[in-house]
Image (cartoon, rainbow, N blue to C red):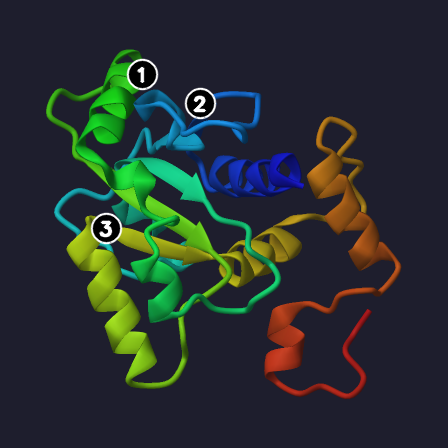
Amino acid sequence: MAGFDDSLVREYFEMNGFFVRQSRKYAVQSRRKRADEEGDLLVINPSPQRGAEAPFQLFSSDLPKLSAAVVAVKAWHTTKAITPTMIKKGDLLEFVRKEAVEAAKEAFADLTPTEGQPLAKVLVLPGIPATEPQRSESITLLRESGVDHVLTFRTILENLVQAVESNQSYAKSDTLQLLRLLRVYDMVKAAQLELFGSANPPK
């Protein structure tokens, strides 16, 4: 399943104009990851919006503000949001270790078009708590640990579902083809139609 989740995140960044490099094709299970194995993806924006600062929780409209990032994908779909207790265990945050960041910069060097371009650390996760004080505590813990931004699977899925076109065949992407079929067979609804509460959305 980790491969599918990585593919989902990769498609999301590519569809939003980023170049993406997957750091490895294998899963590390029986030992601790090396520094160069911590980040799942390396992403670069060839045309970032200069002088704009991205917020801590990223939404699709914020992506132009992101220049380059090492991305860790934590697909813990058994929960809708992480908790401060889960963050304190440290399993989420190995990719922000100094050694891991340096390894990412080395792997990224030949892709970076501008010297000195900042390398953000982005954590993809199910969600962060919606209610206080858990939300503020979670954000504080993540920031103090070195995470620059978080991106939720809900944001990713909503964007991809909106982006795929029902009349296109995505033969080269199993992920996009699956989302396209879910739309073709009315298994998912367009978010903007649900937003306005339309009982009979236009076909």
Could you tell whether 102 is left or right of 22 in the image?
left
Q: Which comes sooner in the sequence, label 1 or label 3?
A: 1
Q: Position of residue 126 (x, y in %)?
A: 51, 60
Q: Which comes sooner in the sequence, label 1 or label 2?
A: 2
Write the residue at 26% across / 21% down.
103
In the rendered image, which quarter contains the N terminus?
top right
Identity, as a three-letter code, of the amino acid under mark 3: Asp
How far apart are labels 1 and 3 at the CA level?
19 Å
Identity, as a three-letter code, of the amino acid under mark 2: Ser
Q: Position of residue 131 (x, y in %)?
A: 38, 85
Residue highlighted by disc 3: 148
The image quadrant that residue 5 belongs to is top right
**Element type at mark 2:** loop
- In this orientation, does residue 166 appear? no
User: What label does residue 23 carry, if any?
Assistant: 2
Determine whether 54 is above or below 83 in the image.
Answer: above
